[in-house]
Image (cartoon, rainbow, N blue to C red):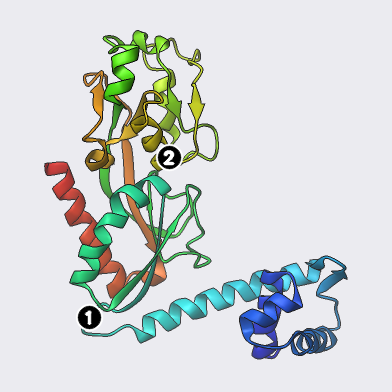
Amino acid sequence: MDWDKLRVFHAVAEAGSFTHAGESLNLSQSAVSRQIQALEEALQVPLFHRHARGLILTEQGESLNRTVREVFAKLAMTEALLTESRERAAGRLKVTTTTGFGATWLAPRLKKFMTQHPDVTVTLLLDDSDLDLAMREADVAIRMHPPKQPDLIQRHIATFGYKIVGSADYLKGAGMPQRPEDLDNHRLIVYGDYRPPVESINWLIEAGRRAGSPRRAAVEVNSLPAILYAVRAGLGLAAMPDYMNDDLNELTTVLPDLKSPRIDAYFVYPEEMRHSKRVGVFRDFLVSELAALNAS
């Protein structure tokens, strides 16, 4: 199998059309089509079902694409490791984490990291579901749970709690809860059941109630930054992770003595990245910054 044809095949499989694949490869649609036809003739199997709305992989095409995707992922990882400077960290680092942690805690600190390591460029992928590190969807991950994928290196880097917060305007009208049971009389904003990044994220709807009898939330939003804006606007109360402390200063803490669940954060990366300087300096940066957060 010719590598150039496999590269074209992979682009077509991911794009779902000859036209879009050609745009990404800087080739004409006819050139892409000829490459795919030649590959199908060499293998003597059809790789795509062709129809008016695009292309769908055949069973044989699905099998080939799984292998090709894995091969190209390994090649990309190897290339990154080979081109990294021996003297200092350099190159692109793809980091994935949850939208809440990434947007409110990590993104504001990237300037400090990149000032310390100017030869490293960062791609930040915010997703509340887990990207596949083995398939190189990202190089490293910061996850709010132990990694579920096997063969990943993990390091526990922090433990967070929650703060129940509300705006001064909301509490002026609704009153300050004195006991957890008083939350029954308040509008609660929760994450909802949309692939939550942490199992305990909606603990507020059961705080002070019998297990299995949750309150009904007033609003569900599948984004912690959006929940923060809703609280600031006076929509209601929410439980926010305390790594967001800097963003919670203008809000009022409610029921500060109420014990909340804990969130364990992990730094995770594949075995192949163990000796990467980019990964090492980023890990050390996170540990240092989070230690400063816990000490404050």
Per the image, the residue denoted by label 2 is 226
**Picture quarter with the N terminus:** bottom right
Q: Quadrant of residue 279?
A: bottom left
Residue type, label 2: Ala
Residue type, label 1: Arg
**Picture quarter with the C terminus:** top left
Determine the residue positioned at 71% across, 80% down. Answer: 9
Q: Does residue 272 sit above or below 41 in this rendering?
A: above
Q: Quadrant of residue 4?
A: bottom right
Determine the residue positioned at 17% across, 56% down. Answer: 288
Dot 1: element: loop
Using the image as rendered, state which of residue 35 and residue 67 is in the foreground.
35
Determine the residue positioned at 50% across, 57% down. Answer: 131
Q: CA distance from mark 2 to mark 1?
A: 38 Å
Residue 20 on image: x %, y %: 69, 75
Q: Earlier in the sequence, mark 2 or mark 1?
A: 1
Per the image, the residue denoted by label 1 is 88
Residue 102 in view, yes or no: yes
Residue 165 on image: x %, y %: 30, 26
Image side of residue 253 versus residue 137, left or right: left
Image side of residue 91 versus residue 13, left or right: left
Residue 210 on image: x %, y %: 44, 10
